[in-house]
Image: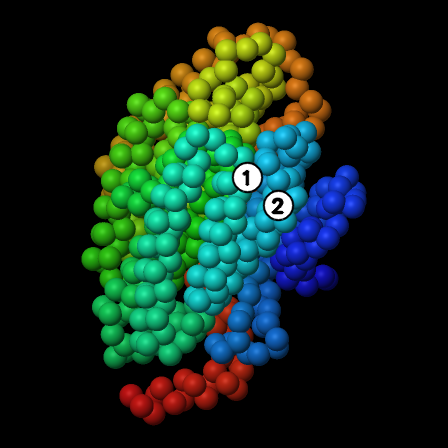
């Protein structure tokens, strides 16, 4: 079996080689990029049976945890990495026919693979400081991609985005420093074992440090009130950037937030704060999307609402204090949301201009219109698409653990979402003829995500089995047993016991 770290190394290497190779072998370089992402997808599919029973622990430089950097490819992280590579492959197919969409195409093919490598690392790293480092790489990549094609308000949008994310980075770094001062470790699994294994551990200060880190992540997850810094990055840059931000960046950041909430936050007060922030994000974002005229910004607000929903149901899952499926369903919802929203952005690109307004011209593409409709129905949860199955299971679980008010919020949110999304789709249909002259490559980029949606629609039982096996705590317990066997960790624990 090939080491899954190769799925990080190959895109990273591709990005660094791009300035040297792209100008000389432009066409072959694009084929090489497609080959790399295809290889990553096949590699991750191959290791899924292995990681389903036992997570793969990889120690960088052969230095054991908690002092060495550790990557864990469990079932959850592997499927998320698979999603990232799949969307990346679709984006490359989309870009093959859109060479004029950016002022410097070589820069895109340099930055984009590095962004993908950072996102895969972000999803699978077990080092809290590495989360910060990879997130900074992602953020810098977003800055660069946003400026590749400048519209009237692009510069101002990027400046606002830099301001917001800089605040988030400062908060994260402060929280990480406090966490290290309290625990003496940066390894997530080791910190979790300290949190659950020491009776005299100050969990209140610990939760404050974690909450500061989560507040920094909220900026990248575009949650209220921090989404005021980032809405323009959707509205005044290329539509493909919205697909990258919403389908990839935001989804992975929410995934990391859920991971930290699941493993670290045990104080009910902090869970209540996360619930309030999540609910306010849902309400603010859905009503903002409902009144928004700019299509890209509207889709952005829809994504913000999904972030709030995911954080809320995970916090409610932990607050209930009983074993339930909400966490696993939230992970599957991340995947379905990422694929659906990515498809919607790519489809909408055929219908809107640089200001986010609908283009009144013929032959904009009926395949794109069909893709937008299917992705919309999946996102809001209309049967038989997988979004319905996931939301139905979530609502059932919320009713079972006595949170009917949250079930009502989800239903109202979905109702508002389907109104403004289908209203937008209707405008696409009215203003465009039934003819279609879409290039084959663009059709392929839209059809590939739909195949995944239809696969889950035909076999929802597979979706249920996959989600029910995803649990960070189960993977973490297995990881703790493994790293406990290292002499370095045992010596560190013995020193702590002596001090107590």
Quadrant that contains the N terminus: bottom right
Query: Circle 2 sits on which residue?
Result: 107
Q: Residue furthest left?
A: 269
In the foreground, 227 or 183: 227
Left/right placement of residue 163 relative to residue 247 reads left
Above or below, 372 against 429 in this view is: below
Where does the image place residue 382, in percent across and percent down from the top left?
44, 25
Task: Determine the residue positioned at 25% across, 64% down.
Answer: 208
The residue under label 1 is 148
In the image: residue 279, left or right of residue 128: left
Comes first in the chain, label 1 or label 2? 2
| Secondary structure found at label 2 | helix
**Nearer to me, 351 or 257:** 351
Seen at 36% across and 64% down, the residue is 173
Is residue 482 in view from this perspective?
yes
Q: Quadrant of residue 52?
A: bottom right
Mark 2 Cα shell of 10 Å, populated few (<14), some (14-19), many (≥20)? some
- x and y percent of residue 222 in the render? 36, 44
Location of the C terminus (image quadrant): bottom left
Percent coordinates x, y for residue 337 in the rendering: 47, 37
Which residue appears at 73% of the width and 42% of the height? 30
Cα separation, mark 1 vs mark 2, equals 8 Å
- Image marks 1 and 2: residues in contact by CB distance under 8 Å: yes
């Amino acid at each position: 079996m090939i080491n899954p770290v190769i799925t990080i190394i190959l895109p990273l290497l591709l990005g660094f080689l791009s300035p040297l190779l792209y100008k000389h072998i432009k066409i072959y370089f694009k084929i090489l990029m497609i080959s790399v992402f295809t290889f990553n997808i096949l590699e991750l599919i191959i290791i899924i049976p292995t990681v389903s029973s036992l997570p793969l622990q990889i120690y960088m430089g052969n230095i054991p945890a908690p002092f060495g950097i550790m990557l864990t490819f469990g079932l959850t992280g592997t499927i998320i990495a698979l999603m990232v590579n799949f969307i990346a492959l679709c984006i490359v197919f989309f870009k093959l026919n859109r060479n004029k969409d950016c002022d410097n195409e070589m820069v895109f093919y340099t930055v984009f693979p590095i962004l993908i490598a950072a996102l895969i690392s972000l999803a699978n790293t077990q080092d809290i400081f590495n989360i910060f480092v990879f997130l900074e790489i992602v953020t810098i990549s977003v800055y660069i991609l946003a400026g590749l094609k400048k519209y009237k308000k692009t510069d101002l949008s990027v400046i606002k985005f830099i301001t917001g994310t800089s605040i988030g980075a400062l908060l994260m770094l402060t929280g990480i420093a406090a966490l290290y001062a309290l625990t003496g470790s940066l390894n997530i699994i080791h910190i979790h074992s300290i949190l659950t294994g020491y009776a005299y551990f100050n969990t209140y200060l610990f939760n404050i440090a974690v909450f500061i880190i989560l507040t920094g992540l909220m900026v990248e997850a575009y949650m209220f009130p921090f989404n005021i810094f980032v809405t323009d990055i959707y509205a005044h840059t290329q539509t493909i950037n919205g697909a990258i931000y919403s389908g990839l960046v935001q989804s992975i950041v929410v995934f990391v937030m859920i991971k930290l909430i699941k493993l670290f936050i045990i104080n009910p007060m902090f869970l209540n704060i996360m619930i309030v922030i999540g609910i306010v994000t849902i309400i603010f974002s859905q009503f903002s999307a409902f009144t928004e005229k700019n299509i890209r910004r509207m889709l952005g607000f829809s994504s913000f609402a999904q972030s709030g929903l995911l954080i809320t149901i995970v916090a409610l899952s932990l607050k209930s204090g009983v074993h339930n499926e909400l966490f696993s369903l939230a992970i599957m919802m991340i995947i379905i949301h990422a694929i659906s929203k990515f498809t919607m952005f790519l489809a909408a690109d055929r219908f809107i201009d640089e200001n986010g307004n609908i283009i009144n011209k013929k032959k904009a593409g009926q395949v794109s219109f069909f893709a937008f409709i299917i992705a919309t129905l999946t996102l809001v949860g209309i049967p038989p698409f997988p979004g319905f199955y996931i939301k139905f299971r979530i609502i059932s679980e919320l009713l079972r653990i006595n949170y009917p008010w949250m079930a009502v919020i989800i239903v109202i949110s979905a109702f508002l979402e389907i109104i403004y999304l289908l209203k937008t789709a209707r405008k696409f249909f009215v203003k465009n003829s039934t003819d279609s002259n879409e290039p084959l490559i663009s059709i392929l980029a839209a059809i590939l995500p739909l195949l995944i949606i239809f696969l889950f629609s035909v076999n929802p039982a597979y979706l249920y089995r996959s989600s029910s096996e995803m649990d960070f705590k189960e993977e973490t317990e297995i990881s703790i047993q493994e790293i406990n066997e290292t002499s370095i960790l045992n010596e560190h624990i013995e020193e702590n016991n002596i001090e107590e």
